[in-house]
Amino acid sequence: MSEKILVIGANGQIGTELVNALRDKYGAEEVIASDINSPIYAIRHSGPFEFVNVLDKDNLHHIFTKHQPTQVYLLAAILSAVGEQKPKMAWDLNMTGLIQILDYAVEFGVKKVFWPSSIAVFGPHSPQENTPQYCVMDPNTVYGFSKLAGERWCEYYYEKHGLDVRSLRYPGLIGWRANPGGGTTDYAVHIFHEALKKGSYQSFLSANTALPMMYMDDAIRATITLMDTPAEQITIRSSYNLAGISFTPAQLAEEIKKLIPNFEISYAEHDPRQAIADSWPKSIDDSYAQKDWGWKLEYDLKTMTEDMLKNLKNVILA
Ligand code: AKB
């Protein structure tokens, strides 16, 4: 049976890259990109696009009826930093949006659903080094506890309705094709832009704040591999830990300096994102992903930095 894939929130950092990867894999016409905002040129001109507000039930119902998707990727969300400025809105979008999609997925017989979780599901009492899949989880951001509750809903729909829903706890994601939108890990993308444009960057996180991060190529490959894995191999229906590379702003700056020797980094004195970062893991144990679906990371700090600077330079110069 051929696939019809609906990606909701296609204009974001993950969506921009995932839509391209899915169109390469399944054919452009089979992947419907959708978002509340107008798409960037590449998304609009490489295949079908629909305007979708995930909180508009009727509009969403119409889109499901029209396209009869076999797979749905729900990427629309408010991230950690913006979530603290708009807590009720973040809860509403992240939670009501998810439950609506899970309901329509059941009603329309969708074969598979993908929904992203995050390292933000962990909190100050979770072990910070090599954070295991199962441990104390006391997230203290609205984004974090909306993701934790969302994981519970995903597992619930799998158990109660047999819905094949799959999820990853993404670390901070770094890519050159699209900008991140309002997270705590955004510094690790901004730093590359500023290094190339200005030769300097002021980090809003302190020099020694270690966080798990991942290059977008690895994140997209992890997503597609998880979705291709036979259902019987998926033992976790909440969300899989995904480790990536752990580094601090100072370590990233050192790596950038190897290619841009005059690059200089400074650090902001006070930023509300610091407290969020301090409550998150420094490194993650993703042994379940390795065991269940053969996950293996490709990019390390050095290769990611090289690839990021090479590609971003072309975008900035274009
Ligand atoms: C954020 O910083 O909010 C996100 C995330 C780690 O989920 N990038």
Image: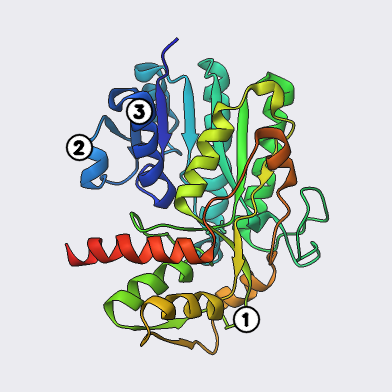
Instruction: Give the percent coordinates (x, y) of residue 239.
Output: 67, 41
| Distance between mark 2 and mark 3 Cα atoms | 12 Å
Q: Mark 1 or mark 2, which is nearer the start of the sequence?
A: 2
| Distance between mark 2 and mark 1 Cα atoms | 42 Å
Amino acid type at mark 3: Val
* Element class at badge 2: helix
Instruction: Give the percent coordinates (x, y) of residue 53.
Output: 39, 39
Which quarter of the rendered image does ligand 1 occupy? bottom right
Return the residue at label 3: 31
Task: Quadrant for the N terminus, please.
Answer: top left
Instruction: List the single residue furthest toward the top.
Output: 1
Q: Mark 3 or mark 2, which is nearer the start of the sequence?
A: 3
Task: Identify the residue at image location x=55%, y=24%.
Answer: 112
Task: Identify the residue at image location x=56%, y=73%.
Answer: 273
Query: Height in image: 27 above or below 206?
Result: above
Task: Identify the residue at image location x=41%, y=13%.
Answer: 2
Instruction: Give residue 208's mark.
Output: 1
Instruction: Give the percent coordinates (x, y) of residue 193.
Output: 34, 71
Residue 294 seen from this side:
yes
Q: Which is more foreground, mark 2 or mark 1?
A: 1
Determine which quarter of the picture holds residue 5: top left
Q: Which is more foreground, mark 3 or mark 1?
A: 1
Q: Residues within 10 Å of mark 1 (few under 14, many from 20)?
A: few
Return the residue at label 2: 45
Q: Residues within 10 Å of mark 2 (few under 14, many from 20)?
A: few
Task: Quadrant for the C terminus, please.
Answer: bottom left
Residue closest to the eye, 86 or 234 = 234
Task: Identify the residue at image location x=34%, y=18%.
Answer: 66
Amino acid type at mark 1: Asn
Residue closest to the eye, 206 or 196 = 196
